Amino acid sequence: MSKGEETREKILLSAAELFNQQGYAGSSISDIMRVTGLQKGGIYNHFKSKDELALQAFDFAIAQISRYHRAALRSKHHAVERLQAIINVFRIYIDHPDTLLIKGGCPLLNTAVESDDTHPALRKRAQQAMDSWQDMICRVITKGIEKREICPTVDALEVATIIISSLEGAVMMSKLYGDSTHLKRVINHLNNHLESELRML
């Protein structure tokens, strides 16, 4: 990796963490300069604008989450176990928050809430990330039905909505109260639900 590429990645990591903790609107170029240790010219040498940096920093943050999902799925073969692996990735927010590359909670949740009406391009990026996550869950379920690992009456999109909404809501509650109990409850409930309602006997 060249020095320019290293600097660019440092900016992305620092900005992604800053935006995830303070929000896009709440982060000034001065804040970005502070966390990166660079002058304005050094930042704009790699990104044309704060908007471009925000979009690429979000992509960078989502790529880190995707890396956790791929690692979790690598050793799982049964569809229900693959779904549970996706859910259990969220345990990192409870058990090993210090190992997260991007601090401040789930970047998809944070960005979706903040960009709702204020930043259409960022909102679209969040929708694309959500679509990708939903598609991954649906693919696992569809393949599981084909392999007779999941009940054929299961609605993949419905299950994806329930999993995603439950996890993101639990992250929000745990963050709001500073108590990971809410996330633990939802993870346990979802894992039990998959075993009792989806797994073919």
Image (cartoon, rainbow, N blue to C red):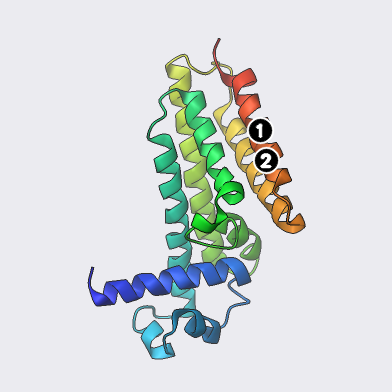
Q: Is residue 191 above or below residue 99?
A: above
- Expressed as whole percent of the image width and height from the top left, the position of residue 21 reads 60, 68
| Residue 158 location (% of width, % of height) | 62, 32
Disc sitting over residue 184 in the figure: 2
Dot 1 corresponds to which residue?
188
In the image, which disc is placed on residue 26? none
Say which of 130 and 7 sits in front: 7
> At 58% from the left edge and 72% from the top edge, which residue is drawn?
24
Badge 1 local density, few (<14 within 10 Å), some, or many (20+)? Answer: few
Q: Quadrant of residue 182?
A: top right
Q: Secondary structure at mark 1?
A: helix
Position in image of residue 155 (x %, y %): 58, 26
Q: Is residue 51 left or right of residue 77?
A: right
**Residue, x 51% and y 25% (percent of image)?**
80
Depth check: give the residue in front, 37 or 19: 37
Left or right relative to 131: residue 186 = right
Left or right relative to 22: residue 41: left
- Kind of residue sitting beneath label 1: Asn
The answer to whether mark 1 and mark 2 are in CB contact below 8 A is: yes
Q: Residue furthest left?
A: 2
Q: Quadrant of residue 112?
A: bottom right
Find residue 71 and report its image quarter: top left
The reply to whether residue 141 is in sight is no
Is 51 situated above or below 95?
below
> Residue pushed farthest right?
177
Q: Residue at x 70, y 56 (%)?
A: 175
Tell me which amino acid carries mark 2.
Lys
90 relative to 39 in the view: left or right:
right
